Amino acid sequence: MEDVRLMHEAGVNLVSLAIFSWSRIQPTEDVWDFDWLDRVIGILHDGGVSVNLATATASPPPWLAHANPEMLPVLADGTRLWHGARQHYCPSSPVYRSAARRLVEAMAERYAKHPALAMWHVGNEFGCHVPACYCDISAQAFREWLQRRYGSLEELNRAWGTDFWSQRYSSWEEIIPPRRTPTWPNPTQQLDFMRFSSDALLDCYEIEREVLQRLSPGVPITTNFMSFFKPLDYWKWAEREDVVSNDSYPDPSDPASAMKAAMAGDLMRSLGRGRPWILMEQSTNRVNWREINQVKPPGLMRLWSYQAVARGADGVMFFQWRQSRAGAEKFHSAMVPHGPMSSSPGWREVVQLGAELRRLDGVGNTQCHAEVAILFDWESWWALELPSKPSSALRQMEQIESVYRSLYEANITVDFARPRDDLSAYSLVVAPALYMVTDEGVANIERFVGAGGVLLMTFFSGIVDESEHIRLGGYPKPFQELLGLNVVDFHPLGIGQHVGLRFADGTAARGTTWSEHIELGGAESLATFASGDLAGRPAMTSNGFGSGTAYYLGTRPDGAAMARVLEIVCSRADVASGAETPHGVEAVRRVGKGKSILFLLNHRDVAVEVPIGEAGTNLIDGTEVHRGLLRLEARGVAAIHEGW
Ligand code: GAL
């Protein structure tokens, strides 16, 4: 009762429930205890609060693991992970899968018709602690997955290139997950194991979804994502969700956090193909799992909540409601803190946010609109970061962030897309280090440029096919005609090393991470290397292709120079900034039928004045906003319904 009263005070209308409750619901194999859950759901319902009900499968009870130790996951080095924490299951374990199915059936049978039920929350953060299992059961499941993929051993041997280092398999039984080996395991084996491991967890999700769709039709289903989480191919997962939801825990001490969280928001919106998503978890204040867990300064939780809304979220939630007294997360912040609420700035901010969000109905049925897409493909990410490359300093996220940052700082909204997705809605497509690409992806990118699109591709793209075999004939073979060039060889740069760059207009800049020997084959050079072995050779090029233009970068220009590159390509693509704002102020628009809401987010810890081009009403406090300058307090926010 006290909780419901506080929930009303905080404006809470949806509660995630029972996420780690399996051992309470099913204390032993044949004993079920739903009384407490009935009571809690009943209290919430009476208080007008809806429930995002978990299937509770994320942490199997000790009795299950104790009776079936073979269901516990195993690491690449053979170490078995025991029960006593959470997520201790092998995703391929038939014991785990059937026990989980039984639990979900029991949950769905009991609560499908409950009026408080608003959504099903399957598992929790799949793969968070155990993204892959290397046990014998997984090995067998991996073999079956490979049989489905390749059909014959001969085809597998071809795809894995097993003649190299005498790895040819003569029977399926010889194939194992890439366990700990003397040196690098076969790269395609590793890549396939990542594909398999993402699919194995997705199968667990699908088992639950099938039960829910059968026993609880019509109730939306979600599982909470973890932003750019490398082990799971969320493109595949999101297709199987009714609502995309995300957990976001940016580090308050990292100056890049705002940009990274914006990027995660854009990814969630893109995964849902533009549908509204939910910020499922964030902390009100400190977390407990970093080395040093810094507080969120006043206003930051509110600011980051609005940032999610600005980038397409229609719901803002938290982990956790009450700060726990026992267990591993008792020092993690919560909406309701350990101490008295009266002295908790966190609680006051929660209450303020809850009251404000109620006024944001106008945001319903609006969404962000992007003219720019960044190509992002999980499989290519996995392949790019396999070992034994020209440079292990080449990391997918860094390459994406370096282009995203320039667009973010220019207030240009970005979608993420797969290389094979329909790109026709975009004016500009950026492909940062798109190392692995399928023939379908190549054809799609060509089609986009041919039809008038503008492409910016960066180095080490189009290098391998989906088996991770080099596409022979000069790099990047599938894009040579599109880009009008040939890359003779890669010259990666050392950590901290720079290479000089000179743009055609004479301005100087620096590149990091990479350089390469580019031979022009029709393209025009827009910038050259200005130092080192490659001095005088092209570093950035452009090439007309069909009615579009394909730009190419053979290095990673640092800071301002990357912004300059993006300016060049955006201007060619006619993509303009969404709003001119002072440094540190993010501007994003959500638009809908006849309405446009401009979110202004001041990420700085001082007040700023933001030029306003179009008058409107700030939905957060109902004030009128006039053309001219709008003052935004430190970490302040405005959501301006433009036009009156
Ligand atoms: C998430 C998880 C929650 C909680 C939280 C702490 O990964 O879903 O259960 O552990 O992190 O920040």
Image: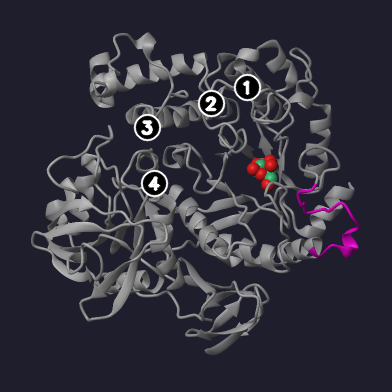
Q: Is residue 464 above or below residue 164?
A: below
Please report whichever mark, 3 or 1, sits nearer to the chain's N-terminal start. Answer: 1
Residue toward you, 309 or 531: 531
The quadrant in which residue 140 appears is top left
Q: Is residue 343 visible?
A: yes
Secondary structure beneath label 4? loop
Secondary structure beneath label 2? helix
Q: Position of residue 559 (x, y in %)?
A: 41, 70
Q: CA distance from mark 4 to mark 1?
A: 40 Å
Crowding at dot 1, Cα within 10 Å, few <14 / some 14-19 / many 20+, comes out as many
**Which residue is at a point 63% across and 61% down the rendered structure image?**
305
Q: Which residue is mark 1?
A: 100
Please report whichever mark, 2 or 1, sits nearer to the chain's N-terminal start. Answer: 1
Q: Which residue is mark 2?
A: 204
Amino acid, disc 2: Cys
Q: Which residue is mark 3?
A: 191
Q: Position of residue 209 (x, y in %)?
A: 54, 29
Q: CA distance from mark 4 to mark 2?
A: 33 Å
Q: CA distance from mark 3 to mark 4?
A: 16 Å
Instruction: Read off the magenta span.
Output: 331-345
Q: Which residue is mark 4?
A: 392
